[in-house]
Image (cartoon, rainbow, N blue to C red):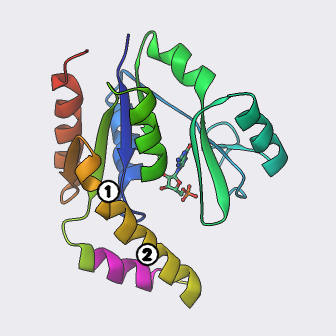
Amino acid sequence: MGKLIVISGPSGVGKGTIVKKLLKTGGYALSVSCTTRAPRDGEKEGVSYFFITEKKFDEMIENGGFLEYSRHFGKSYGTPKSFVEKQLKTHDVILEIEVDGALQVKKSYPEAVLIMVVPPNARELKARLLKRGSEDEDTIQKRMQRMEYELSKRGQYDYTVVNDKLEAAVDEINGIIKSVDKK
Ligand code: 5GP
């Protein structure tokens, strides 16, 4: 059996880049989530996400198809259970999800390894988010609140990794995964 690795962190912290690097180092399977939000430029169906309707999402909830799911920024996100369970037989599986979902996973899979990626300097990240272009005041406020909320849950994670230097953060996470005993 592989390990279930959950990686979270506030938006803009660089967790997407970290996950891409981890996948390149090999051996991991990445869970592809379902979402009801629209694809962004360059995102591919079945690679970035499975883009589905709210109706389909609700059906999947009813059928017990999600390992976890949550709603944030007015959209729904969920981890399909069947893929993860199948992959876990042969691989360590990475979930890149937000905190509410991560804590749900920990309840059903206590052996899951929860890793939160945090910025070296939260104030700097806030400034970066503020500068990040076109979003209106309301959206920015929501993102800020979300960031505070995510960081407030770090105590419930098994590990916190500071993303100061990308390579170092990736090495640290690889080290954590390798060192965790299979229970
Ligand atoms: P985005 O819309 O920017 O791709 O993702 C927004 C947030 O949703 C990110 O924090 C991302 O980690 C989280 N997310 C992506 N997929 C899932 C999922 O399947 N479940 C949960 N709970 N969160 C997810």
Residue 41 can be seen in this image: no
In the rendering, at what x and y percent does residue 50 appear? 69, 40
Work out whether residue 129 or residue 72 is closer to the camera in this orientation and state it.
72
Residue 125 sits inside the magenta stretch? yes
In the image, what residue type sits under mark 2? Gln
Residue at point 18%, 60% (across, down): 164
User: Would you name the residue on which mark 1 appears?
Assistant: 153
Chief secondary structure of the magenta span?
Answer: helix
The amino acid beneath tag 1 is: Lys
Residue located beneath label 2 in the image = 145
From the viewer's side, name the closer residue of 122 and 30.
Answer: 122
Quarter in which the C terminus is drawn: top left
Q: Tell me if residue 171 comes above or below residue 15 in the rendering.
A: above
Going 36% across and 32% down the picture, which residue do you hit?
5
**SS for dot 1:** loop
**Can residue 63 be seen at all in this image of the molecule?**
yes
Q: How many marks?
A: 2
